[in-house]
Image (spheres, helix red, strand yellow):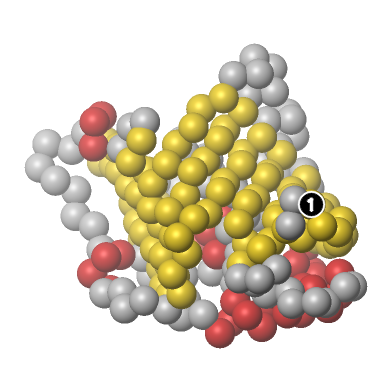
């Protein structure tokens, strides 16, 4: 399925230290991610159309809680709220008075951003991981999926070796469109209430129910 804000992005938390090989990198990535209970971050997202060369920049905040709860709020240029609960996903567009409803498991049928954030995507199983060395003080990894999908045929991630955190992700789809996300102000293991991942459509909002699809 395709959310309008293009959730086919990779957002994993990386820990690499001075490790050199790709195999060791993927092992440490999983270890670090598994140790994190919650995180918050500001994000900026640049969506580039390969055909027109036009770009759209979005920004907002993201809050994650294990095992797979997500609160993704786009603030500019227009508001959008994605809530991933234990069994239900809501994608809400307040300006349009529209809310899309999905089953959570629908997000894990492909290599979506949600799958990576939740730790359900195993890099060593799903990708060929290539360490491309240092770039502007960051460590760059190239991810080539064993089974490419329309929304993801190639990805790159950049990691701050001091903070041991992912700072930028670039995903390229079958058509050459780019989806780049930059994370800032990452906060690890803040207190997060479960109510943040609950949503009730306001009165007057049209609900498109996709849970029966």
How far across and how far down the image is residue 139, in percent? 77, 60
Q: Is residue 59 above or below residue 167?
A: above
Residue 152 location, quadrant: top right
Mark 1 closeness class: few <14, some 14–19, many ≥20 residues within 10 Å: few
Q: Is residue 133 left or right of residue 190?
A: right
Image coordinates for residue 112, horizontal then vertical, percent: 59, 53
Q: State the residue position of label 1.
A: 135
Q: Is residue 114 visible?
A: yes
Residue 5 vertical placement versus 64 (above, below): above
Looking at the picture, tell me which residue is in the foreground, 15 or 116.
15
Image quadrant where residue 83 sits = bottom left
Q: Is residue 209 visible?
A: no
Callout 1 secondary element = strand
Q: Residue 141, how many percent across, how many down?
A: 79, 58
Choose top left, top right, bottom left or bottom right for residue 208: top left
Q: Quick check: 56 left or right of 139? A: left
State the residue at coordinates (31%, 38%).
79
- Observer-nearest of 50 and 4: 50
Q: Residue at 42%, 42% (x, y): give it.
A: 59
**Residue drawn at (67%, 74%), measured in percent from left and top?**
15
């Amino acid at each position: 399925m395709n959310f309008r804000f293009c959730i086919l992005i990779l957002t994993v938390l990386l820990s690499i230290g001075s490790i050199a090989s790709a195999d060791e990198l993927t092992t440490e990535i999983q270890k670090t991610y598994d140790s994190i209970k919650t995180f918050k971050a500001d994000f900026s997202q640049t969506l580039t159309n390969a055909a027109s060369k036009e770009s759209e920049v979005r920004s907002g905040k993201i809050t994650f809680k294990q095992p797979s709860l997500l609160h993704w709020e786009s603030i500019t240029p227009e508001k959008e709220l994605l809530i991933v609960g234990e069994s239900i996903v809501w994608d809400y567009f307040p300006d349009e008075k529209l809310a899309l409803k999905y089953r959570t498991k629908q997000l894990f049928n492909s290599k979506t951003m949600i799958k990576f954030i939740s730790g359900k995507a195993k890099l060593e199983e799903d990708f060929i991981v290539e360490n491309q060395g240092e770039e502007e003080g960051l460590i760059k990894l190239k991810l080539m999926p064993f089974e490419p999908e329309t929304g993801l045929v190639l990805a790159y991630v950049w990691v701050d070796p001091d903070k041991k955190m992912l700072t930028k992700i670039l995903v390229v789809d079958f058509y050459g469109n780019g989806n780049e996300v930059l994370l800032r102000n990452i906060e690890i293991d803040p207190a997060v209430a479960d109510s943040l991942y609950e949503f009730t459509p306001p009165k007057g909002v049209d609900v498109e129910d996709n849970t029966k699809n």
